[in-house]
């Protein structure tokens, strides 16, 4: 059985190639050098991220799964049926809890719309879901959820999922743009389910980004592979060391790559040479941690309102159910 429908966004590939060139040129020219975290997720990076999700230190993944296991029935009750939209779907192990909770009756009136920049990842996960739920409607949308939310279907009510606390990777400006665009695509009946990693003791946070098997370090360094491949650069992984720390004043984890010696890098496609002093870093990711108050403030700015706030017993992770 093949997926029932796929909408591709033809210009995505060329647009993304242009975007990484621009983003890397800007990021590596600033005084605090940076590379946007969305470039972690090539095929290898996505595999490494899935491995991170299985690490004992990386509590967000398993905590979110336990929340979904527990709350899917009530989420589905308030949703009814329509489009189940997942932004940045990647592998499909979270959505299954919701699809299961729908039951055969609502499932037959629901269509799953995974949104991802990787059409191969979308196709693979759609095929797997169709094996598990024969006849289920899956309409993948190959798109970038930071710019393409206007492409979401709007002829039926939808439940939009943005899980994993991926919103924590956005800075203030990106958060505002994203939530504004989301707010604009939401009709009165629509619901938004947002996964948020919460503020907690610094030891737990830092362990989650400094795992003992060094998978997170591999994941972090993989961004250099991506830049080498996409922009014809000559970064050497061994010149950089993984660094992750919690900045309490900002309630965020920062991941950096720190030059262990003076480094010179050539970026062919940009006709650019970049110099690093020993100890200088590239900021590769921020991962914000939220409280109910900070989440509410962020959402209010986009005219969105939290109607339900579900957390685990330890208060480590939350699902906010949101209306327009
Ligand atoms: C799920 C993408 C939000 O920020 O915790 C995991 C990515 N980075 N380990 C996060 C990530 C380092 C993750 N996101």
Image: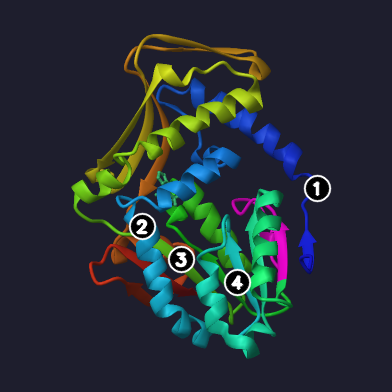
| Crowding at mark 2 (Cα within 10 Å: few <14, some 14-19, many 20+) | many
Are the residues flagged by discs 4 and 1 in contact, CB closer than 8 Å? no
Could you tell me how far apart the alpha carbons at marks 4 and 1 are, in whole angstroms?
A: 25 Å
User: Which callout, 2 or 3, points to the residue nearer the camera?
Assistant: 2
User: Which callout, 2 or 1, points to the residue nearer the camera?
Assistant: 2
User: 222 or 17, which is in the foreground?
Assistant: 222
Tell me if residue 229 comes above or below residue 209 in the rendering.
Answer: above
Are the residues flagged by discs 2 and 4 in contact, CB closer than 8 Å? no
- The residue identified by callout 2 is 60
Marking on residue 194: 3
In percent of width and height, residue 277 lies at 37, 11
| Crowding at mark 4 (Cα within 10 Å: few <14, some 14-19, many 20+) | many
- The residue identified by callout 4 is 186
- Sequence order check, earlier mark of 4 and 1: 1
Are the residues flagged by discs 1 and 3 in contact, CB closer than 8 Å? no
Boundaries of the magenta span: 138-153
């Amino acid at each position: 059985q093949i997926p029932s429908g796929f909408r591709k966004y033809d210009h995505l590939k060329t647009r993304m190639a242009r975007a990484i060139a621009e983003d890397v040129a800007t990021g590596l020219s600033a005084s605090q050098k940076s590379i946007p975290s969305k470039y972690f997720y090539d095929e290898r990076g996505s595999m490494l991220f899935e491995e991170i999700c299985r690490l004992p230190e990386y509590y967000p993944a398993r905590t979110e799964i336990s929340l979904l296991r527990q709350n899917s029935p009530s989420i589905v009750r308030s949703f009814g049926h329509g489009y189940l939209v997942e932004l940045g779907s990647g592998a499909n192990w979270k959505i299954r809890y919701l699809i299961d909770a729908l039951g055969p009756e609502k499932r037959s009136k629901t269509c799953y719309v995974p949104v991802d920049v990787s059409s191969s990842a979308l196709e693979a996960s759609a095929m797997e879901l169709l094996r598990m739920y024969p006849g289920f409607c899956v309409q993948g949308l190959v798109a970038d959820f930071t710019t393409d939310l206007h492409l979401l279907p709007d002829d039926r009510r939808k439940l939009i999922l943005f899980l994993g606390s991926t919103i924590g990777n956005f800075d203030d400006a990106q958060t505002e743009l994203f939530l504004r665009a989301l707010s604009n695509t939401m009709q009165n009946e629509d619901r938004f389910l947002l996964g948020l990693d919460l503020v907690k003791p610094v030891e737990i946070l830092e362990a989650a980004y400094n795992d003992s098997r060094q998978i997170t370090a591999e994941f972090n360094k993989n961004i250099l592979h991506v830049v080498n491949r996409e922009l014809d650069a000559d970064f050497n992984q061994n010149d950089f060391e993984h660094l992750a720390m919690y900045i309490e004043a900002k309630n965020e984890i920062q991941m950096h790559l720190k030059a262990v010696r003076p480094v010179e890098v050539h970026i062919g496609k940009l006709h650019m040479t970049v110099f690093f002093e020993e100890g200088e870093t590239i900021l590769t990711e921020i991962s914000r941690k939220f409280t109910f108050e900070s989440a509410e403030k962020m959402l209010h700015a986009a005219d969105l309102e939290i109607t339900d706030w579900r957390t685990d017993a330890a208060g480590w992770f939350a699902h906010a159910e949101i209306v327009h």
